Amino acid sequence: MRILHTMLRVGDLPRSIDFYTKLLGMTLLRTTDRPEQKYTLAFVGYGANPEHAELELTYNYGVDSYDLGTAYGHIAIAVDDVHQTCALIKAGGGTITRAAGPVMGGATVIAFVQDPDGYKIELIERTAA
């Protein structure tokens, strides 16, 4: 068994695609528009299934925002340099919600950013071995 994708409902699909591709460096893998069912899907990621898990962005026609609820936590992404990644995201207009630095009680360098719909993304510094 393996994780294939995670789905997030988004209020503005082009804005979300821009965030994940331009600020987080993902690739737009494919899109599917279902006008009869009134939704559009965009799959983004650092590679495609089956080798990589993907992020499915779902836009339901006419819905421009969602209540995130209290159960959702965050998506975690490994990066080479958290400080540099945060600087690039901030320069691109992204929101940093927790500045780069060591995790409380540990040495791992992390940061949190927020996508245009309010979803949290944890950046975890993982240098190549």
Image: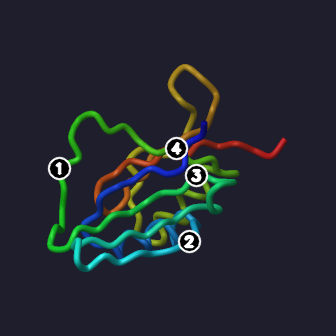
Disc marking residue 67:
1
Disc marking residue 53:
3
**Sequence order check, earlier mark of 3 and 4:** 3
For the residue marked with disc 4, what is the amino acid?
A: Ala
**Sequence order check, earlier mark of 2 and 3:** 2
Residue in view at x 58 percent, y 52 percent: 53
Disc 1 secondary structure class: loop
Residue in view at x 56 percent, y 71 percent: 29
Residue 115: x percent and y percent?
37, 59
Gap in Å between the C-alphas at discs 3 and 4?
12 Å
Disc 4 secondary structure class: strand
Residue 82: x percent and y percent?
60, 50
Query: Closer to the camera, 66 or 82?
Result: 66
Q: Which numbered mark, 3 or 4, is in the foreground of this view?
A: 3
**Sequence order check, earlier mark of 4 and 2:** 2
Judging by the rendered image, the residue that carries numbered circle 2 is 29
User: Are circles 3 and 4 on residues that touch, CB within 8 Å?
Assistant: no
Question: What scheme was used to colour the molecule?
Answer: rainbow
User: Are circles 2 and 3 on residues that touch, CB within 8 Å?
Assistant: no
Residue in view at x 29 percent, y 58 percent: 9
Gap in Å between the C-alphas at discs 4 and 2?
19 Å
User: Toward which corner of the image does residue 48 lie, by quadrant?
Assistant: bottom right
For the residue marked with disc 1, what is the amino acid?
A: Asp
Residue 50: x percent and y percent?
65, 54
For the residue marked with disc 2, what is the amino acid?
A: Leu
For the residue marked with disc 3, what is the amino acid?
A: Ala
Q: Which numbered mark, 1 or 2, is in the foreground of this view?
A: 2
Residue in view at x 60 percent, y 36 percent: 1
Gap in Å between the C-alphas at discs 2 and 3?
11 Å
Judging by the rendered image, the residue that carries numbered circle 4 is 76
